[in-house]
């Protein structure tokens, strides 16, 4: 009888261990991926609802809780999606896909390969990469103006408004007073005071790619692609280094939160034990970070307090457009990611679709 109890005890221990192992993976595999708008394999500019709408290389996404706003890079437009209905319209930029730098209202304004987008709830801010400018859109009216930078002029100059210069700005984030820009071609993080348009360099040194941690210009980045803010810190998808960096806004102190510079891969783990492959998009719900790990065709999750990295959805090394749960879902070059705190939205660029993860 004692032997029987011992055997039963062993089975209970094994069952508990397996349940524990299963629990650590179901947090990722429990994420359900569906296609919210657009049709995989069908490129275009059509407005419509759900799969009737068409996109051309949609990249970044932001949300005000009611709508999604998407930089439809290949169409040189900003698209709006009503979350409750999935209805897609062209909010700003030429519906014909014309590129340019014209300020104006709605479709009279022109963009050139818009990449990053963020909102403060009242305005949208767009990293208009092809123009090397930062644009502002008043949500209520669709009025587009140039906040900083000069169209057709690349550089790294700090200054106010058009006196400041950028070089292929990609990612953008905002808080109440400021906008932060991943100025990819300069390998720097820039800060713009919204009220004045004053641009300064918060971290990194223009013309000096690298992976050094440090404060302000002592820190080095390599093609930083996107940026997210929790109001206290900035988080950077440092794509050329395959790392996720953290910047304390008040001090400009830069550290590496996850990934190892110079080591691309898809490993889950904590801090530098985790590996990424060309991370291009980043979003936060203030507890976790969500990464569009483009080279792996996956969405990764980082618990900020611990630096623990898991694969939230998608299968590393497998591209496609399949909907499903966890690793059963497939992505094709995901670039943008945004969250409203409950749902995650992905700009699945290679599929020309917007995906939804719940």
Image (cartoon, helix red, strand yellow):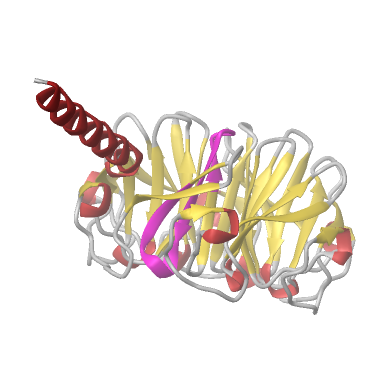
**Image quarter hosting the C terminus:** top left
Q: Position of residue 166 (x, y in %)?
A: 76, 68
Q: Say whether residue 293 is magenta.
A: yes
**Image quarter hosting the N terminus:** top left
Count of labels shown?
Answer: 0
Residue 110 in sight from this viewpoint: no
Instruction: Please identify the dominant SS of the magenta region.
Output: strand
Please give the name of the residue rendered at 79% of the width and 36% of the height, measured from the top-left corner. Answer: 177
Residue 37 in sight from this viewpoint: yes
Name, please, the residue furthest toward the front: 2
Nearer to us in this view, 89 or 318: 318
Q: Quadrant of residue 200?
A: bottom right
Nearer to us in this view, 316 or 184: 316
Q: Quadrant of residue 139?
A: top right
Classify residue 219 as left or right of residue 128: right
Q: Quadrant of residue 249?
A: top right
Q: Say whether residue 158 is magenta.
A: no
20 is higher (above) or lower (below) than 101? above
Please give the name of the residue rendered at 31% of the width and 35% of the height, measured from the top-left corner. Answer: 20
Please give the name of the residue rendered at 30% of the width and 60% of the height, measured from the top-left corner. Answer: 331
Classify residue 117 as left or right of residue 21: right
Q: Position of residue 325 (x, y in %)?
A: 22, 45
- The magenta region covers 283-301
Classify residue 252 as left or right of residue 166: right
Q: Position of residue 242 (x, y in %)?
A: 56, 68
């Amino acid at each position: 009888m004692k032997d029987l109890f011992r055997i039963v005890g062993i089975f209970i221990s094994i069952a508990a261990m397996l349940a524990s192992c299963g629990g650590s993976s179901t947090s990722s595999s429990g994420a359900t991926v569906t296609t919210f708008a657009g049709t995989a394999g069908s490129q275009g500019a059509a407005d419509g609802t759900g799969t009737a709408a068409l996109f051309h290389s949609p990249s970044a996404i932001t949300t005000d809780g009611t709508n999604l706003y998407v930089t439809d890079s290949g169409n040189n437009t900003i698209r709006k999606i009503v979350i409750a209905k999935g209805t897609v319209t062209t909010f700003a930029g030429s519906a014909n896909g014309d590129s340019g730098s014209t300020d104006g209202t709605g479709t009279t304004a022109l963009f050139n390969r818009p990449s990053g987008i963020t909102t403060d709830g009242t305005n949208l801010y767009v990293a208009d990469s092809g123009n090397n400018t930062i644009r502002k859109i008043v949500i209520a009216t669709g009025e587009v103006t140039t906040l900083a930078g000069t169209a057709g002029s690349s550089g790294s100059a700090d200054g106010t408004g058009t006196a400041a210069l950028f070089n292929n700005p990609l990612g953008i984030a905002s808080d109440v007073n400021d906008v932060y820009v991943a100025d990819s071609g300069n390998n720097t993080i820039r800060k713009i005071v919204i009220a004045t348009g004053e641009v300064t360099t918060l971290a990194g040194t223009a013309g000096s790619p690298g992976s050094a941690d440090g404060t302000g210009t002592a820190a080095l980045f390599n093609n930083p692609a996107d940026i997210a803010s929790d109001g206290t810190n900035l988080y950077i998808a440092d794509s050329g280094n395959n790392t996720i960096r953290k910047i304390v806004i008040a001090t400009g102190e830069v550290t590496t939160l996850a990934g190892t510079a110079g080591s691309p891969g898809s490993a889950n783990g904590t801090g530098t034990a985790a590996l990424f492959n060309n991370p291009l998009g980043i979003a936060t719900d203030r507890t976790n970070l969500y990464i569009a790990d483009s080279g792996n065709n996956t969405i990764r999750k980082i618990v900020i307090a611990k630096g623990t990295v898991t694969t939230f959805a998608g299968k590393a090394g497998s591209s496609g457009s399949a909907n499903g749960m966890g690793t059963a879902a497939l992505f094709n070059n995901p670039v943008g990611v945004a969250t409203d705190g409950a749902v995650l939205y992905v700009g699945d660029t290679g599929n020309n679709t917007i995906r939804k993860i719940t």
